[in-house]
Image: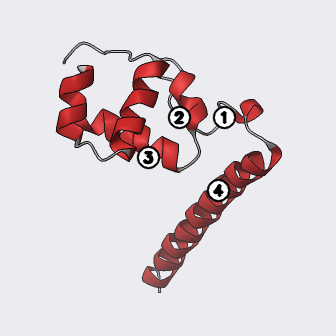
Amino acid sequence: MGKIVHYPEEIKWEAVNLRKNGMTYKMIQEKLGIKHKRQIQNWVKWYENGETYRFSQGIGKQYSYGKGLEELNEVEQLKARNKQLRIQVEILKKYQDIERGWSQKSF
């Protein structure tokens, strides 16, 4: 297992800006000394999803549910809560389908 690298917020913003300006992931990696292309892809995805508060979170803290909500405006907080509730509904529907399958097998 490799060593975990923490990139400063400035590097994350620079990588996103370079990508927006058309640079390839490989070029950005070489220019900024970033180990993995996937890291840059994550930062770009966070930027596109309006989750830029994640840039300032430390290692192991880059998750959206339960972190950073106080930094979001009311609309973003409601969107995050809505997303959480939709996921819960999906899980409950899947559980109901599984239960239905069990009850049909017992006949």
Q: Amino acid at mark 2?
A: Tyr
Q: Secondary structure at mark 4?
A: helix
Contact (Cβ within 8 Å) of mark 3 with mark 4: no
Category of crowding for the residue at label 3, using alpha-carbon neighbours closer than 10 angstroms: few (below 14), some (14–19), many (at least 20):
some
Gap in angstroms between the C-alphas marked 1 and 3 = 19 Å
Q: Nearer the viewer, residue 21 or 37?
A: 21
Q: Looking at the image, which residue is at 56% across and 61% down?
A: 91
Q: Is residue 36 visible?
A: no
Q: Position of residue 53 (x, y in %)?
A: 60, 31
Q: Which residue is mark 4?
A: 83
Q: Looking at the image, which residue is at 65% across and 52% down?
A: 84
Q: Position of residue 63 (x, y in %)?
A: 53, 34
> Which of the two discs, 1 and 3, labels the residue nearer the N terminus?
3
- The nearer-to-camera label among 3 and 4 is 3
Q: On residue 63, which mark appears? A: 2
- Residue most extreme to the bottom: 107
Q: Which residue is mark 1?
A: 66
Q: Position of residue 28 (x, y in %)?
A: 25, 32
> Considering the image in quadrants, where does the N terminus appear?
top left
> Which of the two discs, 3 and 2, labels the residue nearer the N terminus?
3
Gap in angstroms between the C-alphas marked 3 and 2 = 13 Å
